[in-house]
Image: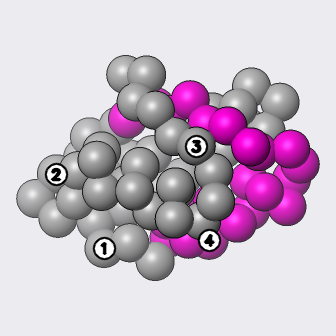
Amino acid sequence: MNTVTFQTSGVHCRSCTMMIEMTLDELDGVASVSTDHAAQTAIVEYDAAKTDPEAIAAVIRAAGYGAEVVS
């Protein structure tokens, strides 16, 4: 498993973080998601054989939020 951290934008409340978590839970290869609306971050553990940071960021963006890889 790999881990990637995203700096998110447009995440204003717990409902926003829940939306990101629920959306990413549907992406094949995502094992876990931890979001923090106050810090505007999302930490995602994923299987590199099934997905990658670019695909994960695209899903976050499709949900209406910004996402840039931090690490």
Element type at mark 3: strand
Q: Which residues are magenta?
A: 4-25
Is residue 28 visible from the viewing direction of this image? yes
Position of 69 relative to 26 (above/below) = above
Residue 31 lies in what quarter of the image? bottom left
Mark 3 or 4, nearer chain start: 4
Element type at mark 4: helix
Q: Position of residue 49 (x, y in %)?
A: 10, 59
Camera-near label (1 vs 3) is 3
Image mark for residue 48: 2
Is residue 31 visible from the viewing direction of this image? no
Residue 71 falls inside the magenta stretch: no
Cα–Cα span, label 3 and label 2: 22 Å
Query: Residue shown at 51%/65% (left/top)?
Result: 62
Mark 1 or 2, nearer chain start: 1
Cα–Cα span, label 4 and label 1: 12 Å
Q: Position of residue 28 (x, y in %)?
A: 30, 73
